[in-house]
Image (cartoon, coloured by chain):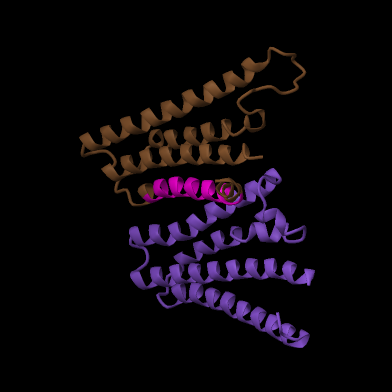
Chain colours: A purple, B brown
Amino acid sequence: MALSRSMRTCLHSGRLALLAILVSSGIVLQILACALYNNWWPMLTVLMYLILPMPLIFFLGSDTSSIMSNGGDSWVNFTKFLTGASIVGSIAIPSILKHAGVIGWGALTMELSSFVVFGVAILWFLQMNGEDEYSGVF
Amino acid sequence: MENLALLWGIIGPGVSGAIFGAGWWFWVDAVVCSAVQVSFLHYLPGIFATLAALMFNCVNKDEIGYDYYSPYGDDSEWRVKLWLFVAYVVSFVCLAGSVGLLVQDALTNKGPSVWTGVAGVLQCVLVLISGLVYWTCHSED
């Protein structure tokens, strides 16, 4: 890495800002999906979004390698289970609402794109955290 | 091949959670979109399948050898085997029950639609598969 230290800090805070923009645009998309159609049913998906980042919240304080490592505590396994279930749930709830005719195609698209945006943000956040540990060695 | 096992240890519980969620959400979809009231009898296979999946995840650490230190002495293998046996019986009865309900729903027009029956079978199968997948992740330790 040939970047100077100040450049690296600038890049890092730039990435954090971009991450914050991603998360807020996800929230905006979610709220728009309800507000534009004056139909507040899609807010149920927010319940799933609360469960989604649980492994991060619980285990980010301790060493992050416990998420990426094999085996591990049985609580880590259970939170991963919850994450998997909530990922499917946040795709399933808008689809069920659409299937039952409660919301339309536009709301469904906005819900799903909000989910994709959140997913990208979380994956990027995890990757950034992994990078931090790496650069600490240098 | 070893890398695959490591990767499975990392994402396995997540995949199991996703399959479990898929199973139950298909059922929720069938109940919500059903034109008639779905009776409690139709909920039973799914509930018992979840119970069975929970049951055979309780015997994770004992592995296939079933040798573990227990206060009951050496001949307590039979408790673990009985537990597993009951779990298997419950899961097979659920599968059979859900398929039977599907056939019944397909034959008559007055009861729930075919989608309810299909969703019931899907729910049972997916929940049981999710339980098995979660069990394999445990044994990776």
Residue at x 45% of width, y 46% of height: B24
Is residue A21 covered in magenta?
Answer: no
Residue at x 42% of width, y 49% of height: B28
Magenta range is B10-29
Determine whether, in the image, residue A100 is placed left or right of residue A130.
Answer: left
Q: Nearer the viewer, residue B97 or A22?
A: A22
Q: In what quadrant of the picture does the C terminus of chain A appear?
A: bottom right
Q: In what quadrant of the picture does the N terminus of chain A appear?
A: bottom right
**Is A62 rendered above or below residue B135?**
below
Is residue B25 covered in magenta?
Answer: yes
Q: Nearer the viewer, residue A6 or B19?
A: A6
Residue at x 72% of width, y 87% of height: A7
**Is B3 rendered above or below residue B75?**
below
Position of residue A120 measured from the top left corner of the image (x, y, whole percent): 54, 70
Q: Can I make out residue B111 in this image? A: yes
What secondary structure predominates along the stretch shown in magenta?
Answer: helix
**Is B37 rendered above or below residue A65?**
above
Determine whether, in the image, residue A3 is placed left or right of residue A22.
Answer: right
User: How many numbered circles does the render carry?
Assistant: 0
Q: Can I make out residue B113 in this image? A: no
Position of residue A89 measured from the top left corner of the image (x, y, whole percent): 49, 56
Determine whether, in the image, residue A84 is placed left or right of residue B39.
Answer: right
Position of residue A75 measured from the top left corner of the image (x, y, whole percent): 69, 46
Position of residue B38 measured from the top left corner of the image (x, y, whole percent): 36, 41
Residue at x 69% of width, y 12% of height: B75
